[in-house]
Amino acid sequence: MTADLFDALRSPGPAREPLAPGAMLLRGFARPDEAELIAAIETIIQRAPFRRMITPGGHQMSVAMTNCGPFGWVTDRSGYRYDAVDPESGARWPAMPPLFRELADKAATEAGFAGFAPDACLINRYEPGAKMSLHQDRDERDIGAPIVSVSLGLPATFLFGGLKRTDKTQRHRLVHGDVVVWGGPARLAFHGVAPLAEGEHALLGRRRINLTFRRAR
Ligand code: SIN
Ligand code: FE2
């Protein structure tokens, strides 16, 4: 373990932490793009503001969401789905900035999944106290493609489990710029986020923003 840590610190590339077969944490991978990412998010949320959606069971989510790209993930009383249109505005979701697509593809490649072409980017906003319960991402038609998840702003505790809800979960602290990729044998792993702790981030203030890239169709 100690030798691995020193290798990671010495290597010129990003620190890679394997979480499970098919799952990799890339430390600081998005840091070089932080300013451009944040500027692009600000533009997107002017057209498609964050909103707290309702689950099929009738609960309002603590995480506020929006989307960019051809398809957006939405939930309401009728269920979960991917929709080309923002139900709040009736317009298509804002386009996915080329930088987003490139970053997702680079991270997927780094984790062993070359050729990732996301058509959906869910943008999650966590304020202190917000959380995401353990779940699988299984609303996508093509589960051959991985999930790429980019963390910005306040740190969070990421829960990463197995293929069964009852499998033991690992806890990983994700900080600004970290990217997690899971696919292949880990594609349907249960995962979630523990309630966000209070804090103030230099660039994003009292928020954590997560970009989740997927191949939906
Ligand atoms: C998600 O599973 O959609 C979000 C994960 C995260 O916020 O890190
Ligand atoms: Fe998820």
Image (spheres, rainbow, N blue to C red):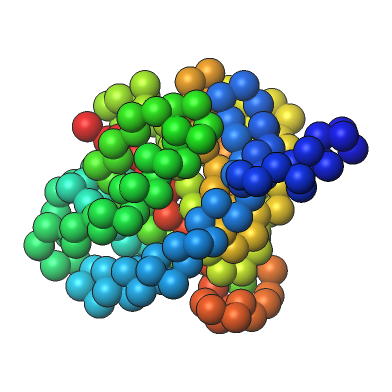
**Residue at position x 40%, y 49% in the image:** 103
Left or right of residue 66, residue 87 in this image:
left
In this rendering, the answer to whether 20 lies above or below 121 is above
Q: Is residue 12 visible?
A: yes
Q: Nearer the viewer, residue 201 or 35?
A: 35
Q: Position of residue 77 (x, y in %)?
A: 29, 50
Task: From the viewer's perspective, tell me whether residue 37 is left or right of residue 133.
Answer: left
Q: Where does residue 132 sit, x and y in percent of width and height?
A: 55, 52
Q: Which residue is drawn at the image coordinates 56% and 69% (left, top)?
A: 153
Closer to us: 85 or 108? 108
Q: From where the camera sits, is residue 61 visible?
A: no
Say how many tags the image has: 0
Farthest right residue in view: 2
Between 189 and 7, the one nearer to me in the picture: 7
Is 6 placed above or below 186 here? below
Q: Extreme left residue here?
A: 91
Q: Nearer the viewer, residue 8 or 12?
A: 12
Quadrant the N terminus occupies: top right
- What residue lies at 50% left-to-right and 26% top-to-bottom? 112
Position of 32 with respect to 142 (left or right) is right
Residue at horizontal 27 percent and vertical 69 percent from the top: 44
Question: Which image quarter holds the C terminus?
Answer: top left
Instruction: Give coordinates of residue 194: x percent, y percent.
Output: 66, 54
